[in-house]
Amino acid sequence: MIEGTLYENRSSANEDAVLYISNENYTIQVEDTIIYAGQLASLLISPRLGNIERKITLEDGSIFATKENDIVDELILKVIKKKNILHKFETNIIFVFISLILAILFSFSFFKWGIPYLSKKIAYTLPLEVNNVISQNTLKVFDNYIFTPSVLTDEQKKEIKSSFESKLLPLVKQNNKIQYNIHFRQWKSEDKSIANAFALPNGDIVLTDEFVNLSKNEDEINAVILHEMGHIENRHSLQRLIESTFTAVLIMYVSGDTTSLGDLGIGLGSLFINSNYSRNHESQADLYAFEKMLAIHIKPENFANIINRITKDSIIKEDSILGYISSHPNTSIRINMAKKYTECYKKGISPCK
Amino acid sequence: MKSLTFNGSGLEYFKIWIVNILLTIITLGIYYPWAKVRNNRYLYANSILVDKNFEYHATGKQLFIGYLIAIILFVTYNVINELFPRVSFILLALLFISIPWLIWRSMKFNMNVTSFSNVHFKFTGGLGQAYITFFVYPLLFIILSIGIIALITTINNEFSILLGMIAMISLYVYAMSYFSVKKTNYLINFSRYGQGEFKTNLEVKAFVKIILKTILVSLLTLIISLVIAGFIYYFTISELGVFNDLIVNKGDPKAIINILGAIVPFIIFAYFIMLCISFISLAYYITRQREYVFKNTNLDEEIEFNSTIKFTTLAFIIITNLIAIICTLGLAIPWAKVRMTRYMLENTQVSSKSDIATYINEKKDAESAIGEEIGDVFDVDVAIPL
């Protein structure tokens, strides 16, 4: 027998009642008077959840509520052959432990490998028109707010462009969907001229005046252009867009369940995760550049030299803790890669192992 | 006066929560609405008043469509924001226009699927009223602010700027209070428990007082934090001669990085202090508001409510919850939720002119008109200080 409370349908009027079971039938009695009788199979039993009050709904909508969950499971569920699968999992300590471990593993793997993989697949599937749209808007914004027209001589510009066209373009000739173009801009921040090179997804490569001035020869310039081409060929901008969308959705997803004030702490976390993706992309672009340099016999140390010079020149340095937040790989990692490729260059090995 | 209680435990909830998270992950998120239902059922059904509990009747199926649409919209917005920044403004505008509708639907649905002692709640507010409350009033406020700013910028002298700033702040405080009153009135006065009507009677004046007091509390907390930060700075950074070190090592990038790296903990600490200040202010605001609204709300003129939360305790719970959640990478969420729910419930008191149990026992569900059954929901969380 099960003790509980009997409620009228959709009403809070209630009385103490007892549920009796024999074979596959039940009766409900209130003060020794049988109020209901019927078959167990006609009862609707709420799913077990922890130890919350169990609601058994009768055919006319009345509800028999009881706290005796175990007895309900024992006497009724067994008979009508229903199971509390979820509840079994939720109360089995081994299963809970497995859930915990698996949840952590899944989440970690998804962030570390899943998102980059998915983003890459999607980035390559999207049409090139998407690249064009992003690029045009971005360059416009840069020109409006960051860049000023270049003050290099036409001579300099022509030299760099023709070197690019004769030596580097042939490497990507087969992929003639992307139209590569070199653009020159000046980037001034306060009174300092900044050295940098950008790649936009549609093939536009922007070199700043200071970058050109810091480089000692055309090999150094081409090395950096190759790095930028690596970004374009690997669809990195698109990937970043898709990755940041994934991350934003997931974090909203997960944090949506905390006390709503936890949102304030999210900003930094997002930054950490997103910067990591950018470092991977930079390494990929480095690799691309080095491989191509070997192919057309540009000494890899040129890349290391110009990077070193730019880094010394720039305001933000990358070592130690700040390296986690910065978006470029550690300079020493890059230089080591350059050394490795210099070895291969000397030995004439291409591709490098 | 009877308080509510919470019967569940953090550990029990954690087990349910983590298993359902695993299921959500395995199904790539599809199971999420069902997980949410199960989590809510646990929290609702363990909320007890005079030995009776609340119930959450929504099903995963009902939540699923709204959930799917919300994700699609969110992703679309993000993508469009990156590709066509100008278009995203239009999308944002559309979102603002749809907020009153979302709130209205959410209230109707969430009330419908909530019951206490086998009697369902109900929300009878109209969509038009929702638009007036959540769209027209905010719009009026924005227009007024723009008007004042425009006025200040045309008459360009210091006195008018000062006057303008005072006007802006006063307008803001008054508008916030007015909006809070209208919003709370709308949400409470159209809520029903069975056939019983909730009634609230709020004054803008009271909310203005609360906001002003909150500002005072924020300023106080800010000053105290600045003093503490000042001490820390004095005894650590300047004592260690960090800035001297920086100058001496000017040409050496590696040394500079190491020194700057040592300062990073302080930057993080400063960020943390800032968060604490905003939490304390928020806690104060919530506490006073809840106190006032509860005191002035009744059910059927028979049942009265009271809130006894303290803002210091509330702030402490919020901050320590957040620290625990961050330190455990989210695993402490179930405990945090139980802790907060328990605190809120135990500090909610209900009293009746006659006897609560008797009042409850006489309730029946209201007749529901055809067409009022909302089949699904977008589940917007409306902030009634409950």
Image (tube, rainbow, N blue to C red):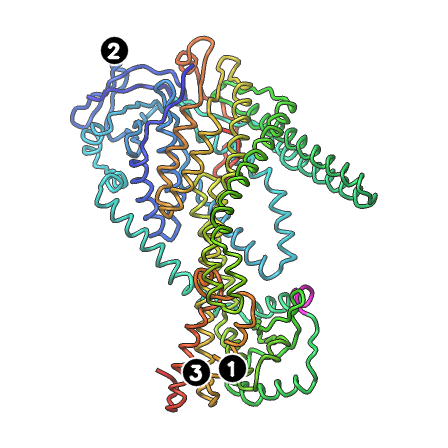
Residue closest to the far left? A23
Q: Residues within 10 Å of mark 3 (few under 14, many from 20)?
A: some
Report, in whole angstroms, how far the alpha carbon at label 1 lies from the one at label 2. 92 Å
The reply, left or right, for residue B283 in relation to residue B25 is: right
Name the residue beneath numbered marker 3: A291
**Which image quarter: residue B129?**
top right
Tag 3's secondary structure? helix
Residue contact at pointers 3 and 1, CB within 8 angstroms: no
Rendering coords of residue B48 (x, y %): 37, 23
Task: Give whichever of A185, B350 is nearer the camera.
Answer: A185
Q: Is residue A204 above or below residue B59?
A: below
Three-letter residue code for mark 3: Glu
Label 1 vs 2, first from the N-terminus: 2
B379 lies left or right of B19 = right
Circle 2: element type: loop
Q: Quadrant of residue A7?
A: top left
Q: Earlier in the sequence, mark 3 or mark 1?
A: 1
Residue at horizontal 25 percent and vertical 20 percent from the top: A37
> What residue is at 32 percent from the left and 39 percent from the top?
B14
The answer to whether dots 3 and 2 both sit on one chain is yes
Same chain under badges 3 and 1? The reply is yes
Report if residue B343 lies within the magenta region.
no
Amino acid at pointer 1: Ala
Q: Which residues are magenta?
A: A141-147
Quadrant in the picture for the N terminus of chain B: top left
Q: Is residue B66 visible?
A: no
Pointer 1: what residue?
A223
Tag 1, which chain? Answer: A
Residues marked 1 and 2 touching at CB (< 8 Å)? no
Q: Amino acid at mark 2?
A: Glu
Prevailing secondary structure of the magenta residues = helix
Q: Tell us which disc is closer to us: 3 or 2.
A: 3
